Image (cartoon, grey):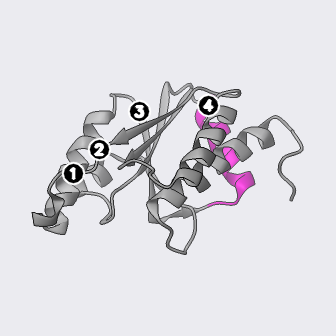
């Protein structure tokens, strides 16, 4: 199974981009992993929040393939411990899925069409983080999940 992280907008903070890149490299030792970046919308200042969500949503949907298992990183999603998340990834891998796609939306969330396409929602915390920080936290958690599944000494309960 390949794990794909779809994000809206590039990671522009250098130290966060570097850390995300490092975790992505580590994840690829265990499972194919890719980050797909949807470009920021041009001239978004003239758009309403809903119009921006619709345009971003169309781009997100275009990045998906038939058969993808889609998980939205959403504040209203299920909260899991790191060990529960590793079990969830293992369960998805056992199902024989070709791709599991996790999606970080834009600043206003997701269009209704994206919610309709999603198989589930996952919350990283009840707190609010920048979209860049979510990328870092998520990639670290995928790496942590891989080490848990392999019984490696990275994670401590």
User: The magenta stretch spans which residues?
Assistant: 80-94
- Secondary structure of the residue carrying tag 4 is helix
The alpha-carbon separation of the residues under discs 1 and 4 comes to 34 Å
Q: Foreground residue, 24 or 123?
A: 24
Q: Give residue 157's quadrant in the image.
A: bottom right
Q: Which mark is residue 39?
A: 2
Magenta span dominant secondary structure: helix
Q: Are marks 1 and 3 in contact (CB under 8 Å)?
A: no
Q: Is residue 62 left or right of residue 82?
A: left
Q: Which mark is residue 135?
A: none
Residue 89: x percent and y percent? 63, 41
Q: Which residue is rendered at x = 48% and y = 29% of the image? A: 99
Q: Is residue 87 left or right of residue 115?
A: right
The alpha-carbon separation of the residues under discs 2 and 3 comes to 21 Å
The alpha-carbon separation of the residues under discs 1 and 3 comes to 24 Å
Provide the residue designation for mark 3.
Answer: 68
- Secondary structure of the residue carrying tag 3 is loop
Residue 59: x percent and y percent? 24, 42
Q: Is residue 88 above or below residue 110?
A: above
Q: Are marks 1 and 2 in contact (CB under 8 Å)?
A: yes
Residue 37: x percent and y percent? 38, 40
- Crowding at dot 4, Cα within 10 Å, few <14 / some 14-19 / many 20+, comes out as some
Provide the residue designation for mark 4.
Answer: 93
- Residue 150 magenta-highlighted: no
For this orientation, the residue located farthest to the bottom is: 127
């Amino acid at each position: 199974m390949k794990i794909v992280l779809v994000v809206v907008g590039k990671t522009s903070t250098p130290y966060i981009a570097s850390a995300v890149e490092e975790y992505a490299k580590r994840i690829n030792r265990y499972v194919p992993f890719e980050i797909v970046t949807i470009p920021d919308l041009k001239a978004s200042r003239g758009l309403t929040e809903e119009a921006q969500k619709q345009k971003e949503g169309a781009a997100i949907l275009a990045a998906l393939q038939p058969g993808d298992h889609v998980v939205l990183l959403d504040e209203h999603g299920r909260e899991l411990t790191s060990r529960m998340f590793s079990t969830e990834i293992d369960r998805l891998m056992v199902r024989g899925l070709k791709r599991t796609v996790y999606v970080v939306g834009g600043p206003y969330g997701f269009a209704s069409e994206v919610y309709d396409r999603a198989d589930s929602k996952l919350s990283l915390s009840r707190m609010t983080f920048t979209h860049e920080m979510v990328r870092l936290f998520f990639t670290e958690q995928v790496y942590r999940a891989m080490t848990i599944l392999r019984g490696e000494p990275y994670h401590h309960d």
